[in-house]
Amino acid sequence: RNLKKYFPIKKSWLPSTVEHVRAVDGINFWMNKGETLGLVGESGCGKSTTGRTILKLLEPTDGEILFEGENIVNFNRKRLRSIHRQMQLIFQDPFASLNPRKTVGDTLDEVLFIHDMKDAAERSERIKELLRMVGLKKEHIHRYPHEFSGGQRQRIVIARALAVNPKLIICDEPVSALDVSIQAQVINLLIELRNKLGLTYLFISHDLRVVKHISDRVAVMYLGKIVEIAPSEELFKNPAHPYSKALLSVIPVLKPERNRKKLLLEGEVPSPVNPPAGCRFHTRCSFALKQCCEIEPQKKRIGGEHFVACHLY
Ligand code: SF4
Ligand code: MG
């Protein structure tokens, strides 16, 4: 609720002024248990910061983060630890997130031990089970990260996230570093695990085809704001916000309709330090009205679960 994350930037030549990068600037959304919410937008729009702030890996500047009805923003360390068991993060580069000096078995064993599984035999059984769940073999236990392919490494990362029986997984570009042929396998694994274990995903990606495939609903972010949120099918069929329309119009399709126009996103993304007044998209919007430069559009429901923040509606 009204979540904000600002990063201060100090200027050495002007020590008295502190400016802020307003990476996430007052966003509101909810997630239903068992669903996947896609979060899309150009790089730098605040997607990853949103994910990390929800997990409290970054301290929110303002707002509330409600998990099963409880605001976790002011939780102490002990309560946060139990939250971190329930919320896990999977991110893009599995190489960076795995310790090269630890075997798969050691990596998983460590997580289980930290999270209170003190019986070695029990941990060993659980490790085998986790490997099976992500499609790896028990012979893989003694291997090191470099002995695996990129896709297999991401499976190890998924196994590690699942080790603590989380409820929510924040997937931040989980397949972006993988070959296209491998991406589908990992995405399908994530879908299978979600359905089997009743997981909930926040799926952050700039790749709209992947998001379309996995998401139940999709939120579109621009310069720290959510500009549109809708059920996936609805968003891809009837995007309402001019920014969503432009983003979606450039997805490659198999059989393009003859009249399909690409709406070009012209101009640079403005700086999140001094975002444009009014609608933040007005500097690039070909539909901008007079009030767009002054008045910030509020999110409105335009049917069902379809919300958009734009003066055209
Ligand atoms: Fe364009 Fe105005 Fe809508 Fe913003 S509010 S997207 S500038 S029409
Ligand atoms: Mg990112």
Image (tube, helix red, strand yellow):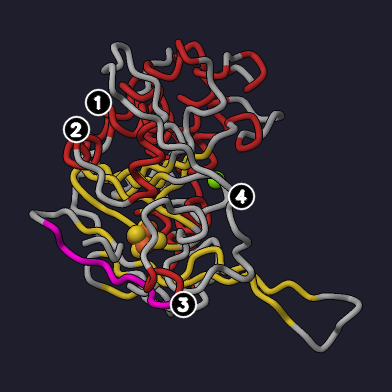
Q: Which residues are magenta?
A: 294-302
Nearest to viewer (mark 3 / mark 2): 2
The residue indicated by pointer 1 is: 192
252 part of magenta stretch: no
Q: What residue is rendered at 52% in x and 77% in y?
A: 61
Residue 64 visible, this orientation: yes
Residue 188 image point, x, y percent: 31, 21
Amino acid carrying mark 1 in the image: Glu
Q: What residue is rendered at 59% in x and 33% in y?
A: 93
- As drawn, is 274 to the left or to the right of 82? right
Separation of marks 1 and 4 at Cα, in angstroms: 39 Å
Separation of marks 2 and 1 at Cα, in angstroms: 5 Å
Separation of marks 2 and 4 at Cα, in angstroms: 40 Å
Amino acid carrying mark 3 in the image: Asn
The residue indicated by pointer 3 is: 76
Nearest to viewer (mark 1 / mark 3): 1
The residue indicated by pointer 2 is: 195
Amino acid carrying mark 2 in the image: Asn
Mark 1 vs 4, N-terminal side: 1
Q: What residue is rendered at 15% in x and 62% in y?
A: 301
Q: What secondary structure is found at the residue carrying circle 4? A: loop
Mark 2 vs 4, N-terminal side: 2
Mark 3 vs 2, N-terminal side: 3
In the drawing, what numbered circle is on residue 28? none
Q: Please name whichever residue, 283 or 111, is drawn nearer the observer in this view of the structure.
A: 283
Q: What residue is rendered at 47% in x and 72% in y?
A: 4
Label 2 crowd bin: few (<14), some (14–19), many (20+), radius 10 Å? few
